[in-house]
Image (cartoon, helix red, strand yellow):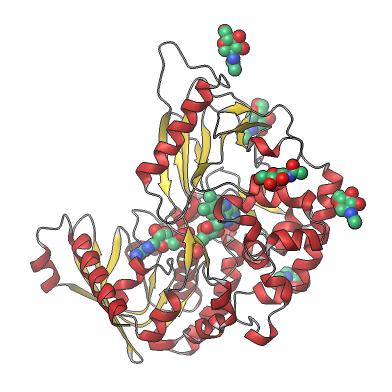
Amino acid sequence: MLSEAKNTVLIGLLYVDLAWAGCPDKLSSAANPKTIRRDVVVIGGGASGAYSAVRLREDYGLSVALVEKEAQLGGHVNTWVDLATGRGFDAGVQSYVDVANSSTAFFRRFGIEIGPNTRPAQQPPVYVDFATGKKLSNYILPATTDRNDALRRYLVVAESLLSVFEPGWWTFPKPDAIPQDLLLSFGDAMVKYNLTSALPQILGLTGGGIKDFMNSPLMWVMRPFGVDMARTILGLNAGFIPTSGKNQDLYDAILKLLGPDSLLSSTVVKAKRADEGVTVDVRNAETCQVTRIVAKKLLYAASPTRENLEPFSLDETERETLYKFQFTRPFVGVVSHPSLPLGTSLSNMPEEAQGGNWTAAANREFPYASGFNNFANSSFFRVIVGGDTTLTEKRAREVLLSTFDRLVAAGTINQTDPPQPLKILYFKNHYQMNAHVPTDVIRSGFFQILNSLQGRRSTWYTGSAWATPITTSLWVFTDTVLPKLVESL
Ligand SMILES: Cc1cc2nc3c(=O)[nH]c(=O)nc-3n(C[C@H](O)[C@H](O)[C@H](O)COP(=O)(O)OP(=O)(O)OC[C@H]3O[C@@H](n4cnc5c(N)ncnc54)[C@H](O)[C@@H]3O)c2cc1C
Ligand SMILES: *[C@@H]1O[C@H](CO)[C@@H](O)[C@H](O)[C@H]1NC(C)=O
Ligand SMILES: *[C@@H]1O[C@H](CO)[C@@H](O)[C@H](O)[C@H]1NC(C)=O
Ligand SMILES: *[C@@H]1O[C@H](CO)[C@@H](O)[C@H](O)[C@H]1NC(C)=O
Ligand SMILES: *[C@@H]1O[C@H](CO)[C@@H](O)[C@H](O)[C@H]1NC(C)=O
Ligand SMILES: *[C@@H]1O[C@H](CO)[C@@H](O)[C@H](O)[C@H]1NC(C)=O
């Protein structure tokens, strides 16, 4: 206990030091913060936080302040715009699943035109073992009918467990009532329900974010790849995208609507939270200006990491609960090189997967690049590097560059003469995703305690640690939190 407390203080000091770096006027600015008063302060302007701020202000008539670390809203969206043509390329979030009537309505209220998802998830793939750079001569995928049969079996299981996941973890069963299937390893569930033919599909859409995939409990696979996702792939749900091809458009429109109620490039340096209300000191990284937000309630919509939570002066219960979350860390980006083949996707597949040994693909160790996927009708390629939370941006870039070098060395692609380096045009750290906790923690009643934190010390929570990490599912979950928050005012 003692050493843990000491560590916390240490981390706290480090954090504050880092937070002030580059702000020479820190003392004067901290001593004279500009104070604003709001009904609700929202932390994090990604899918959940931006949605919350709009609904709280526009639909519930409350005053809000939205605090976002980056210089724009949108979180994982990561649209890169080619300045030469103005065309947008979505490096992060690709498309939306229509999970409720609210999904499309939220785009329409901002005048964002949407249409069916015509965007290919992937260009026709060429399978390459990125560890060696060599093309696989004999990798095969399951027949589509087999895949769909297996996905339908998966869907039946997911539907039987739906109330555990949706909306959010509100009704997660008590430790003695947890359905066995939830904690079964994915590998065992695969055998039990004959899901092997669905593995490449499920892995392709979630694998980069899940560590030790085959041993991971089914619930952590089923959370990002649940009922709505399975139904979308089976053509039973409609996926949609903004017709502009830029997912960022929605968040730019939200930013415009919120105006000065959005505090961009800002993080919390200190917070006091009590039943009577909260006081949050927020520092702008560019101007170094500190703003004190005095609010009745706080809605936390950023990742619950130690670094993010440190300034919030957690009490013991909060710390012992929220610090249990573990994460993975993907990077997404856009690259180009004249030698990368247009109209295809170079897809990372280990040699051992030859002949259709799909479990081999699930056994890869972090960090790795998942592919070079050509954006349709362009010379740009989408890349994702998957890793755990020790992965630095420097290392992630090295993974990408060394993968490219191996592709050249193995003759899979030809370097130009003279050789040109891989051009990394855009590269974004997704910091944390796939919040999960170990099985013994789940069995000790974690979710019941997590739910009991809602509303405690004037603080409410939403975001992908609390619900299915799909934009539209997060909105549905958020719609269950907001009325409770409003009622508590
Ligand atoms: C590669 C990739 C592809 C994806 N594709 C899809 C897809 O196609 N469709 C889909 O629906 N979902 C997709 N997702 C899932 C996506 O993560 C969620 O849909 C959603 O964007 C998560 O929303 P969020 O609000 O929980 O978190 P985020 O979007 O991560 O938002 C959190 C926000 O908090 C900010 N923040 C962090 N720390 C602080 C701090 N200390 N102070 C202030 N602000 C802070 C962050 O900058 C960020 O803006 C994808 C995710 C990844 C990583
Ligand atoms: C969507 O709207 C239709 C028609 O108004 C209604 O029948 C249906 O229940 C709604 N679905 C959801 C998820 O709200
Ligand atoms: C398992 O699934 C495969 C393909 O989906 C199918 O060919 C096979 O018959 C199934 N096996 C059993 C025992 O149902
Ligand atoms: C599939 O690959 C894994 C290695 O990832 C190996 O352990 C297993 O034996 C292989 N299975 C077959 C049938 O070749
Ligand atoms: C690519 O170009 C083709 C042919 O002009 C067109 O049919 C297709 O819609 C384009 N795709 C995208 C994503 O722009
Ligand atoms: C690389 O160049 C050689 C010689 O011009 C050619 O034979 C080969 O097909 C090229 N390989 C690729 C992958 O383009």
Instruction: Determine the residue positioned at 48% across, 29% down.
Output: 404
Q: Quadrant of the C terminus?
A: bottom left
| Residue 46 picture location, percent across and down | 45, 61
Q: How many marks?
A: 0
| Residue 323 picture location, percent across and down | 42, 73
- Image region (quadrant) for ligand 5: top right
Q: Is residue 87 left or right of residue 216?
A: left
| Residue 281 picture location, percent across and down | 24, 73
Q: In front here: 296 or 258?
A: 296
Instruction: Determine the residue positioned at 44% across, 76% down.
Output: 322
Q: In front here: 484 or 182?
A: 182
Instruction: Determine the residue positioned at 63% across, 85% down.
Output: 175
Determine whether 403 is above or below 446 in the image.
above
Q: In front here: 206 or 106?
A: 206
Determine whether 215 is above or below 479 in the image.
above
Q: Is residue 115 left or right of residue 263?
A: right
Residue 61, image quadrant: bottom left
Q: Quadrant of the N terminus?
A: bottom left
Determine whether 9 is above or below 127 in the image.
below
| Residue 151 picture location, percent across and down | 79, 55
Residue 374 in sight: no
Instruction: Determine the residue positioned at 45% across, 56% down.
Output: 75
Residue 415 in sight: yes
Q: Is residue 386 left or right of residue 377?
A: left
| Farthest residue, direction bottom | 276
